[in-house]
Image: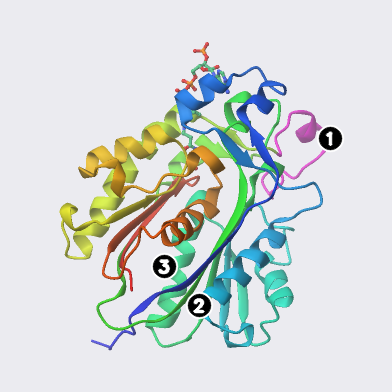
Amino acid sequence: MPDFVPVGIVGVGTCLPERVVSNKELETMVETTDEWIVDRTGIRERRIAKNEEATSDLAVEAARRALESAGVEPHEVDLIIVATATPDHVFPATASLVQDRLGCPKAGAFDLSAACTGFMYALVSGAAFISSGTFKTVLVIGAETMSKLLNWKDRSTCILFGDGAGAVVLREVPRGYGLLASYLGSDGSGGPLLQVPAGGSRMPNCHQTLDASLQCLHMNGREVYRFAVRVMGEAALEVVKRAGLERKDIDLFIPHQANIRIIEAAAKRLGLPMDKVLVNVDRYGNTSSASVPIALDEAIRSGRLISGNNVVMVGFGAGLSWGAVTFKWQ
Ligand code: UT7
């Protein structure tokens, strides 16, 4: 067996747009109420980017903060992975734009597409480059401007999402710390349940697609809800098992922030009290691939993570796809 390098998160940073959009403000845009949104989702407000603000703008700022918190200089970064469903362009990759603006001359850069699960896929991919000895320092970013993909006339989707970015720096850590186990999954048969139908090679955008808002996010909320409740608990249990731990060993659960009811159902399934679960969906809504790193940053800043804690992070989303990791915080 080769001697794998133990890899962990050594720095975290986030960037959230300044503009706060409350449920009350949404009441003026679509037929909805603050009460319905809070009751069905737990969301009270979300951050929305300015028209001229793109995903890379948020990604660069989150990455700067992550590098600073890790004490790592941009020129030390070997690889940048940006998980996003809302890249600045079809190409070049948003990661390349970030690489240039951060000033990381020797870094390779690529985008990773796994929708809301993107950060989990990027984290596991980035870690593999270090554990195999290929690279020493990898920057993993989840960044989204979901507001640009939404149909602001569709009340069943536009109330759910928000914009933001979260970044982590990965490096070697002392043995016994860092990533303990991972689990990535996909069921592409569920693709139509959550998709942006037009704008790709299957249905390039034209006047007709724009008239039908097919360039926007479309979702079968009820079916995605069912999938999410099932997969969130299952994926978490699987990575706990793969790490050789038991449910009682989980100190903090950081789930993808899509809906408080999904989070509570997963916590129940794991037998976890809510004080072991990080929740910020009330303030940011669903920021897709940015949600888990934003929640992780909050956990660190609020002192909820101490050295030796076992953390489980789980993401799920379009694909359908899901991913989970267990790590021991240093
Ligand atoms: O990152 C992964 C992404 N997605 C998710 O995790 C989403 C998973 N799904 C959900 O979170 C929930 O399904 C929603 C929050 C999207 C919807 O909640 P629900 O309890 O499943 O509601 P529903 O879709 O069954 O709709 C119930 C009613 C409908 O009215 P009728 O047909 O019963 O008269 C909807 O038209 O609520 C109506 N409705 C709304 N009413 C007020 C849907 N959206 C709204 C709204 N305000 N914003």
Three-letter code, disc 2: Ala
Does residue 221 appear to the left or right of 143 in the view shown? left
Q: In this view, which residue lies farthest toward the front?
A: 303
Say which residue appears at 69% left-offset and 76% top-offset: 102
Could you tell which of marks 1 and 2 lies nearer the N-terminus? 2
Q: Which mark is residue 92?
A: none
Nearest the eye: 9 or 5: 9
Could you tell which of marks 1 and 3 lies nearer the N-terminus? 3
Q: Main secondary structure of the magenta part?
A: loop
For disc 1, the neighbor class at 10 Å (few under 14, some 14 to 19, many from 20) is few
* Residue 208 drawn in magenta: yes
**Which part of the image, by quadrant, shows the C terminus?**
bottom left
Q: Secondary structure at mark 3?
A: helix
Three-letter code, disc 3: Val
Does residue 209 appear to the left or right of 157 in the view shown? right
Q: Secondary structure at mark 2?
A: helix
Q: Secondary structure at mark 1?
A: helix
**Residue stretch in magenta:** 199-215
Task: Write down the residue under mark 1.
Answer: 207
Task: Write down the residue under mark 3.
Answer: 124
In x, y percent, where is residue 293? 49, 58
Does residue 166 appear to the left or right of 26 in the view shown? left
Could you tell which of marks 2 and 3 lies nearer the N-terminus? 2
Residue 161, quarter of the rendered image: top right
Three-letter code, disc 1: His
In x, y percent, where is residue 70? 50, 77
Q: Is residue 185 visible?
A: no
The answer for how far apart the CA atoms under marks 1 and 3 are is 40 Å
Vertical comparison of 53 with 205: above or below: below
Q: Which mark is residue 70?
A: 2
Q: Nearer the viewer, mark 1 or mark 2?
A: 2
